Image (cartoon, rainbow, N blue to C red):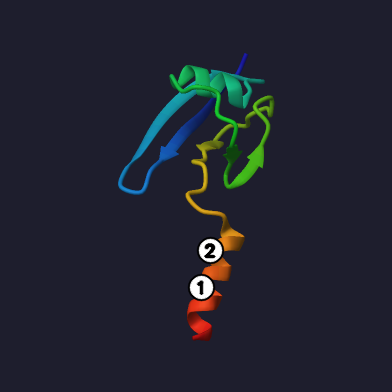
Amino acid sequence: MAKLRVEVIEAWPARHERVQLELEEGATVAAALAAAGRRAARNVGIHGRRVALGARLADGDRVEIYRPLSADPKEARRKRARRCAR
């Protein structure tokens, strides 16, 4: 069976961690997270597009683990608009 080369990335404001892996063809996002020693995250993506944990990987994919938002984007825009209107 062919091998896939993928990487798993998790980032924070001041640093990031990247793990490069070789997985069996047909591997899923959940398998990549497990192989990288990461817990199954609720918000993950491949190359910037959100996907489910069961999504199959292709050679060269970058699995990204997304952090929860620190603020609601709509509320942040409202606050900026109120400040600018003054």
User: Is 19 placed left or right of 66 in the picture?
Assistant: left
Q: Quadrant of the N terminus?
A: top right
Point out residue 78 in the picture as x, y percentages from the top left corner. Answer: 58, 69
Question: Within 10 Å of the Cα at label 2, are there few (<14), some (14-19), or many (20+) other Cα atoms?
Answer: few
Point out residue 58 in the picture as x, y percentages from the top left corner. Answer: 63, 32
Q: Which one is in front, 80 or 5?
A: 80
75 w.r.t. 31: above or below: below
Q: Which one is in front, 41 or 29?
A: 41
Secondary structure under the numbered disc 2 in the rendered image:
helix
Question: Within 10 Å of the Cα at label 1, are there few (<14), some (14-19), or many (20+) other Cα atoms?
Answer: few
Q: Which mark is residue 40?
A: none
67 w.r.t. 76: above or below: above
User: Is 55 placed left or right of 36 in the picture?
Assistant: right
Q: Which residue is mark 1?
A: 80
Give amino acid for label 2: Ala
Point out residue 80 in the picture as x, y percentages from the top left corner. Answer: 51, 73
Give amino acid for label 1: Arg
Q: Residue at x 56, y 36 (%)?
A: 61
Q: Which residue is mark 2?
A: 76
Point out residue 9 in the picture as x, y percentages from the top left corner. Answer: 45, 36
How far apart in space, not on screen, are marks 2 and 1 (Cα)? Answer: 6 Å
Circles 2, 1 touching at the beta carbon (< 8 Å): yes
Secondary structure under the numbered disc 1 in the rendered image:
helix
